[in-house]
């Protein structure tokens, strides 16, 4: 090991004081404290395990002035969002925490632990293990969820003719980022809502579970609608036509950037809404959920067979230009 690790006592104290209490009993035969956890899948359901990992790094995924409570909530919520996109029911998670020595303090850890506990409690999942080292601040969570066998929704199931939908409204993430980066007045009411959306995105767990039987493909929007829809296109081998005037955008986002809000909605990341495709014969059912106020969703376009064998996203009939892509760490 090249990096310096904290004295064992510190490390164990951190685990004992701040993380051990976050293990609920639900399905946990053995939680934090041994070499590994032992977990019981739900009995008699022939379930499959669904596993996803997401890492948050300071400066890249959150600003350095973010407090530990906010960081913890964001870390857990973005991982839960992956479960939502698969139609999975989240159950357990592990936490790999790399922490600068100067942050290994009671206030920081207490806030972090409280943030995690609150989200874990809301979504009924519990911390069952992890790893703690000293180093640059980064939080990696591995989420374990369950689905009835064969019912997980992937990116690869969309077909020619399926309709494209999104949950909620888009552009909140990019708008929030502009507030965080100080481009807008931080004190406004819309800023408060947006900051909340950034630090505590709402994982669409119930929404995803409801989509199990109706969506042919699904993805959560983390890199931007166009970039993420392109993943669906590639995995499914079809193209997507999006009608940009149908893309839902909240009024406060429009106010914040009248000229650029569509840009934010199409190419901004961090929305953590779901984008999914529905076969035509099931659209009436899905639209009914929206009409009844059960689910907040909007139809924004349609999948088509791809010309020349190249899956692509078209905005109002035009191919998306290369520079306008969503976030890519190595791009
Ligand atoms: P090992 O040396 O066997 O890897 P560790 O000393 O790293 O064990 O961890 C001891 C126990 O504490 C393990 O059960 C591990 O899963 C748990 N643990 C370590 N860090 C964390 C953390 N950040 N969150 C939750 N559990 C943790
Ligand atoms: Mg370890």
Image (cartoon, helix red, strand yellow):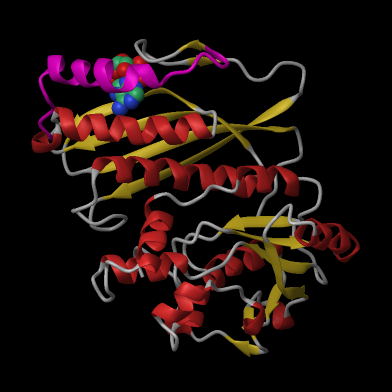
Percent position (x, y) of residue 19? Answer: 32, 22
Left or right of 98? Residue 39 is: right
Percent position (x, y) of residue 105? Answer: 13, 30
Asked whether residue 145 is drawn in magenta, I would say no
Percent position (x, y) of residue 277? Answer: 73, 62
Q: Quadrant of ligand 1?
A: top left
At 24% from the left and 51% from the top, the residue drawn is 66
Left or right of 281? Residue 126 is: left
Question: Residue 117 or 95: which is nearer the viewer?
Answer: 117
At 8% from the left and 37% from the top, the residue drawn is 102
At 51% from the left and 42% from the top, the residue drawn is 80
Which quarter of the figure has residue 319? Answer: bottom right
Give the magenta-colored segment's residue range: 3-28
- State whether residue 156 appears in this view: no
- State whether residue 104 appears in this view: yes
Which quarter of the figure has residue 186? Answer: bottom left
At 23% from the left and 46% from the top, the residue drawn is 67
**Outermost right residue:** 281
- Above or below for 72 versus 263: above
Left or right of 208? Residue 122 is: left
Asked whether residue 12 is drawn in magenta, I would say yes
Percent position (x, y) of residue 52? Answer: 51, 40
- Above or below for 321 versus 277: below
- Above or below for 85 versus 76: below
Question: Residue 124 or 218: which is nearer the viewer?
Answer: 124
Question: Residue 119 or 274: which is nearer the viewer?
Answer: 119
């Amino acid at each position: 090991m090249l990096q310096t690790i904290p004295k064992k006592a510190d490390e164990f104290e951190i685990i004992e004081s701040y993380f051990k209490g976050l293990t609920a009993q639900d399905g946990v035969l053995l939680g934090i404290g041994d070499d590994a956890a032992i977990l019981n899948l739900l009995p008699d359901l022939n379930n499959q395990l669904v596993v996803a990992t997401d890492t948050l790094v300071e400066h890249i995924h959150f600003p350095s002035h973010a407090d530990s409570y906010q960081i913890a909530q964001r870390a857990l919520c973005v991982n839960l969002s992956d479960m939502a996109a698969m139609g999975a029911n989240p159950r357990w998670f592990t936490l790999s925490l790399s922490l600068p020595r100067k942050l290994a303090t009671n206030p920081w850890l207490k806030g972090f632990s409280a943030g995690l506990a609150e989200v874990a409690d809301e979504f009924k999942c519990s911390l069952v293990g992890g790893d703690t080292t000293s180093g640059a601040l980064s939080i990696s969570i591995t989420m374990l969820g369950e689905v009835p066998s064969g019912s997980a929704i992937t990116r690869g199931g969309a077909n020619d003719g399926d309709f494209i939908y999104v949950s909620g409204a888009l552009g909140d993430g990019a708008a929030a980022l502009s507030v965080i980066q100080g481009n807008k007045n931080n004190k406004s009411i819309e800023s408060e809502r947006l900051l909340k959306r950034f630090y505590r995105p709402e994982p669409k767990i119930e929404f995803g579970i409801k989509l199990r039987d109706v969506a042919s493909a699904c993805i959560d929007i983390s890199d931007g609608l166009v970039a993420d829809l392109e993943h669906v296109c590639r995995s499914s081998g079809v193209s997507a036509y999006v009608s940009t005037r149908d893309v839902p955008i909240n009024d406060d986002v429009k106010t914040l950037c009248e000229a650029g809000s569509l840009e934010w909605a199409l190419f901004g990341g961090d929305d953590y809404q779901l984008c999914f495709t529905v076969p035509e014969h099931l659209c009436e059912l899905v639209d009914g959920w929206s009409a009844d106020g059960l689910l907040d969703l909007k139809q924004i376009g349609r999948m088509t067979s791809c010309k020349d064998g190249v899956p692509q996203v078209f905005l109002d009939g035009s191919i998306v230009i290369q520079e306008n892509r969503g976030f890519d760490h190595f791009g």
